[in-house]
Amino acid sequence: MAKTYLLEIGLEEMPAHVVTPSILQLKERMAKFLKDERLTFDQIKTFSTPRRLTLQVEGLADKQADVKKEVRGPAKKIAQDADGNWTKAAVGFSKGQGASTDDIVFKEIKGTPYVFVQTFTAGKPAKDVLAGVKDVITKMNFPTMMKWSTFSFKYIRPIRWLVSLLDDEIIPIEILDVKAGRTTRGHRFLGHDVEIKNATDYEADLAKEFVIADAAKRKAKIRTQIDALAKEHQWQIVVNEDLLEEVNNLVEYPTAFAGDFDTKYLPIPDEVLITSMRDHQRFFYVTDADDNLLPHFVSVRNGNTENLKNVILGNQKVLTARLEDAAFFFHEDQQHSIQAYVERLKKVSFHDKIGTMYEKMQRVMYIGGLLADRFGLTETEKNQLHRAAQIYKFDLVTGMVGEFPELQGVMGEKYAILKGEDPVVAQAIREHYMPTSADGALPQSKVGAVLAVADKLDSITSFFAVGLTPSGSNDPFALRRQAFGIVRIVRDQGWDFPIGQFEADIQHVLQANGATFDLDFAKQTKPVAAFLTDRVKQWFSNKQLRYDIVDTVIKGSRQDIREMFKAADVLNAHQNDPEFRDTIEALTRLLRITAKADLDTRDLTVDPALFENDAEQKLYDAVNELETKLTPALDMNDRFKALASLRPLIADYFDQTMVMSKDEKVRNNHLKQLIKIARMANVMGDLNQLVVK
């Protein structure tokens, strides 16, 4: 008969950001435990609040499944001696299976008789198996752990109570000084302790004590309440999903309410007001129909409507204090020039092993100029980039960013506009931080995109230059994220980006302008190039591209990010073509031959007078014609089609030609022809990595 098992871990309030991942981890561990213990079930429902992690296992079998299996032992010739007596091997095998030699049977496998024993293991009752759930609880992992009282045991927060019920029966579990029972706790202020008579009563019993245990239902209730406030006041309430998730994990019985702040704070940039409300106070902000910020906010209390006015006044008071600080810094920051802030950066350390923030800006200015030439920026854009690079970190020493670090870049743009800077320059100051996450927004302006790449390149090369490189999962300076950001920006902009060449060019331009500031970049050219290439590989992996296609473009000789993307797109698009395999096999055959050629390749002039058959002439004519088409500007897809057109000619060539002729002149003539084709193909990457068998 199917049963329901309830497990509740009662805790001190957990940080909001760990509640959801913790309940998902607990569910996953429970499912694995039940599977390993051969206890079948229909589904596992989850409940979570700041004070509890709960599972309700429905349709649980009342006992483990019985296990019948046939175990093979040694061969008969080993199990019995010449007189037919059981050997020690046979006796030991049978005992090991909980049987005796009387239970042994013989079965032939491929003509050889072997010993077999049939075993039977009766399933244990579910209540006996569930005692092992203690390990499911104690082996959980959390981002931060703590000890309490005199115990050495660590957990996310102190465990205060446990509920463990199989239908209406308590399943004994004891962790430290806490024994499992049937008593759970209601809302900390509105509810009381309550005894759960049956595992199926859990959600309803807690609801009577002002706890909405189902996180999805609790979130839906918050959303409904916010919608009601919006309709009542004709507001647009911006519900940030991450904030809603956080708020949902802070409350057990939500009540949404609206508050106000003085209109005198509205001249402060919206970003400052929103940050104060959303990030610092966990408030939802309010706009009118035209998206203009209104002097109101919406918050959620952990309780009912009783004394709600006092709660509103308290929240308004706290927000006002934050906005007063913001207003002061906003006014005070404007009393100083941008140049004055830049001068302060000469005393601000970027890193004690690297130098100051001002020195970083100097390097980025020269790197940006190098990239601007390479990426084809106009003279106007180059001037805008130059100005942005001169000042783009100035807001780091403003009072506002000191108080609200999350607004760096944002306030740089605001203050730059107020000080009369070109709007493109101001936009680039904000965009140079982008993307701020693996899938974050990218810079929209070309000037901002170049500044972002230059800044990230400088950070990576500088940290590598002083030996502070990522290792394993350790990446304290977020260099992997910055490198991945470069890859995403380059792909988005479609820029030609030869990694190794750029690294060498950066070293040269910094040395030429005396901007190395005693950093030795020369030794890190190859490691940085490899690091950036790994991030390209990561991008492909995220897109679940075939591993051999990824290896092909990554291990190619050109190491140009744009060409890697183009080649991968083309190979991926053509991989199912009927002639794809034959084309790749033809090209890789000549690639393998030319890779072993001991030949001076500076002169690849092919002499038709040395041809020995028509296949050589036809291939020669086709290659000459192809060379006129295969310009750097040729689309990668057209390049692949052109190479594919050589396939039948290459096949005929190999059928009729002894490439490694004993005549050295003829042999070298053959190799020169094949090397020319190999160079055309190498633009696609290392085609030898493709799996086409």
Image (cartoon, helix red, strand yellow):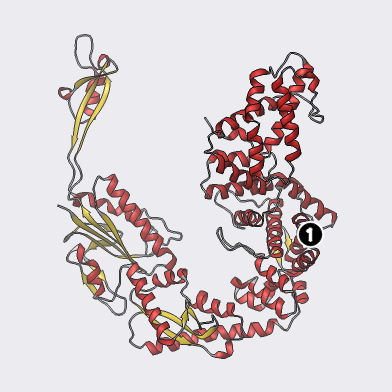
Identify the image quadrant of residue 417.
Answer: bottom right
Q: Nearer the viewer, residue 274 or 23?
A: 274
The answer to which of 464 and 593 lies nearer the viewer is 593
**Residue 439 or residue 635, whichever sits in front:** 635
Residue 124 position in % (x across, y down)? 18, 45
Left/right placement of residue 151 relative to residue 186 reads right
Quadrant assignment, res 335: bottom right
Q: Residue 472, percent across and down?
A: 56, 48
Within 10 angstroms of label 1, few (less than 14), some, or many (20 or more) residues? Answer: many
Residue at the (19%, 14%) spot, across then down: 85
The answer to whether residue 84 is left or right of residue 511 is: left
What residue do we see at 81% from left, 64% from top? 379
Q: Position of residue 606 (x, y in %)?
A: 79, 26
Q: Residue furthest top?
A: 82
Query: In the rendered view, would you say 165 is above or below 523?
Result: below
Given the image, on which type of amino acid does mark 1 rest? Gly
| Residue drawn where x is 61% and y is 73% of the image | 407
Q: How many marks?
A: 1
Look at the numbered disc 1 and give the secondary structure of its residue.
helix
Of 522 and 595, the residue lying toward us: 595
Q: Position of residue 10 (x, y in %)?
A: 31, 66
Left or right of 25 on screen, residue 408 = right
Work out whether 625 lies above or below 417.
above
Query: Taking the image as drawn, is residue 15 in sight?
Result: no
293 relative to 393, above or below: below
Q: Give the residue pinned by disc 1.
A: 369
Residue 97 in view: yes
